[in-house]
Amino acid sequence: MTPNELSAMCVDELVDRFAEIALAQDKAIEEDDNSRYRRLYAQMEAVDQELRLRGREARLALMRLYDYPNMQVRLQAATYTLGVAPGAARNLIQAIADSGWPPSSQTKVTSSRKGHASAPTSTGRVALGFFRPMRSTMSAAIMQSAPEIQNASV
């Protein structure tokens, strides 16, 4: 989707598009399709940039995805709202972590050659902490919302 197409959308449409992208990311993770995930990540960033251009209230609209049935959608919504609703976003991220999602039973190592294990599937990478989309954005948002952490390291 082009920036012009995104700018023509209302906030509710952008939030719906965000959810669609997160659902597609979840499928890409399940299918271990990292290149597709990266393309979807770029699309999500474009939606986020458009919401940022529209101000704080537009970004807060992502909070309606906090109760979405799909956990990936919830996680991405919480991650992208850390800067505007840090308390609620952190609570949701903690709830997701406490839920055990993704289940550790989905962590599996596949064998590509006889006697040699390959890397875990992407679902396994999430469970093992290797696959962390949004880590830099999340860190930046946390640092913005907690200036006392920045000052403590000086």
Image: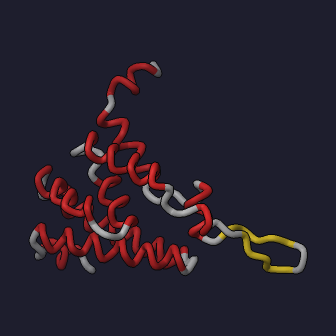
Residue 22 placed where, x, y %?
Answer: 36, 71
Q: Nearer the viewer, residue 20 or 38?
A: 20
Model colouring: secondary structure
| Residue at position x 27%, y 67% in the image | 68
| Residue at position x 15%, y 74% in the image | 13
Q: Residue furthest right?
A: 115
Q: Quadrant of the N terminus?
A: bottom left
Query: Up-down: is 78 above or below 102?
Result: above
Query: Up-down: is 88 above or below 129?
Result: above
Residue 135 placed where, x, y %?
Answer: 46, 51
Residue 30 placed where, x, y %?
Answer: 52, 76
Q: Quadrant of the C terminus?
A: top left
| Residue at position x 26%, y 59% in the image | 66
| Residue at position x 20%, y 68% in the image | 15
Residue 91 placed where, x, y %?
Answer: 33, 44
Query: Up-down: is 27 above or below 145?
Result: below
Tally the marks: 0
- 85 left or right of 78? left
Q: Nearer the viewer, residue 14 or 70?
A: 70
